[in-house]
Image (cartoon, grey):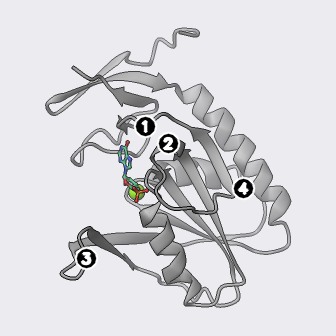
Amino acid sequence: MGSKDCESMEKLQVKDKTFAISIREAEIQKEVRRVAAEINRDLAGKEPLFLPVLNGAFIFAADLLREVTIPCEVSFIKLASYQGTQTTGAVREVIGLAKDITGRHVVIVEDIIDSGLTMAHMIETLEAHNPASISVCSLLVKPDALKVQVPIHYRCMNIPNDFIVGYGLDYDGFGRNTRDVYTLVKD
Ligand code: IMP
Ligand code: MG
């Protein structure tokens, strides 16, 4: 598969699971630059407010924002999970919205969209604050896992419906600190 980068590990052990390299740093960086160029073009003159979602998007946001050349602001948000008493699934509340987003062109920066439920909830929450616009920018999307329709304005890559780690994404808190993305090896 492709050229061999001597700095990449082919396999990654995270706790009890083995992962194999699936998206290399160079490919990620190429797509990050492409998406940043789209943002630079689309949001020029709009002074967007980027809202990267912690923890997963921290590396993606750091790389993306260094390619964004238009005037902009960045403020991190986080999702707090708790078991809802009324619903069957986990409810995730948006916390840390430090900036007033009223009238702002907001760009949500996410690591991955899986079922889309988290993003749908986040958009609904942010819309209540009356931003001028909301754009979604996700490093990865699992199209086959989507359960709800979410607008995805900027995406680096689609991936199959497999569990991945690396480049900010974790398995049980570990595995975020790699330059490449790794896919779970099923046994
Ligand atoms: P969704 O609500 O199903 O779209 O889930 C989105 C969130 O689940 C992401 O922000 C990630 O935190 C997490 N997630 C989904 N798929 C993966 C994966 O393959 N690896 C690590 N985290 C994932
Ligand atoms: Mg996340």
Q: Is residue 25 above or below residue 54?
A: above
Q: CA distance from mark 3 to mark 1?
A: 25 Å
- In percent of width and height, residue 152 lies at 64, 58
Residue where numbered disc 2 is placed: 144
- In percent of width and height, residue 47 lies at 76, 74
What's the residue at 70%, 49% (across, down)? 67
The numbered dot on residue 161 is 1
Check mark 4 vs ligand 2: CB closer than 8 Å? yes or no. Answer: no
Q: Is residue 97 left or right of residue 150?
A: left
Q: Is residue 163 above or below residue 129?
A: above
Q: Residue 20: name its quadrant.
A: top left
Residue where numbered disc 4 is placed: 68
Earlier along the polypeptide chain: callout 3 or callout 1?
A: 3
Residue where numbered disc 3 is placed: 87
Q: CA distance from mark 3 to mark 4?
A: 39 Å
What's the residue at 54%, 74% (across, down)? 123
Type of amino acid under label 2: Asp
Earlier along the polypeptide chain: callout 3 or callout 4?
A: 4
In the picture, which quadrant includes the C terminus? Answer: top left
Task: Kindly state the secondary structure of the residue where label 2 is placed.
Answer: helix
What's the residue at 71%, 47% (across, down)? 35
